[in-house]
Amino acid sequence: MLGTRFNVKAYTNDRISETSLLEGSVQIIVNKNGKDEVYKTLQINQKFTIKADSSAQPVNATEKVSGEVVPLSYYDENQTVETAWAKELLIFEGQSMEEIKNVLERKFDMKIIIADKPVRKYMYSANFSNESIDEILKALQLSYPFTYKKEGNTIIINK
């Protein structure tokens, strides 16, 4: 993989896994009848996304792979959304509070509990660079009302 730059985002608590290609070449390989087969080949500035449902991951069935190839998203002309994390940027584009919670838990090494189900579905688009978790949550509160409290290494969010 000389000269290839790519990013893989595949966390067990995220609903989508993705592989983003910045330079070089990446192939998506699946196993079909015991033999590896190229399913898709990414071009520069593309990403492959697939729903991360571990119960539906095929072992020997190419037909059941339901991913798609889409262009990378750009925050500005020099920064992709997919790799913003490497520059300490958090970029949320139409993401639910449930998805944002997962990102914040990883970034700040905290447990976040959303106690009220309706709050999980709140949708946000926002950008953060060096803000603390308190600053981020206070900014999100400006769009939809919710309360939160810290208990040690845990944050509990309520409506």
Image (spheres, grey):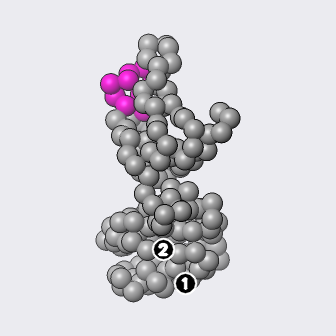
Does 46 sit above or below residue 141? Answer: above
**Viewer-closest of 70 and 33:** 70
Q: In the rendered structure, are the residues bearing label 1 and label 2 in contact, judged by CB atoms less than 8 Å apart?
A: no
Q: Residue sitting at 48 percent across and 85 percent down?
A: 138
Q: Which residue, given by chain and number where applicable, does mark 2 sit on?
A: 127
Which is closer to the viewer, label 1 or label 2?
A: 2
Give the residue at the far front of this rendering: 77
Q: Residue shown at 68%/35% (left/top)?
A: 2
Q: How crowded is mark 1: few (under 14 residues within 10 Å), some or many (20 or more)?
A: few
**Image coords of residue 144 (percent x, y):** 34, 81
Do we see residue 7 in this rendering? Answer: yes
Amino acid identity at mark 1:
Glu
The numbered disc on residue 135 is: 1
The residues colored magenta run: 57-65
Q: Compare residues 68 and 66 and report the one nearer the observer.
A: 68
Residue 3 picture quarter? top right
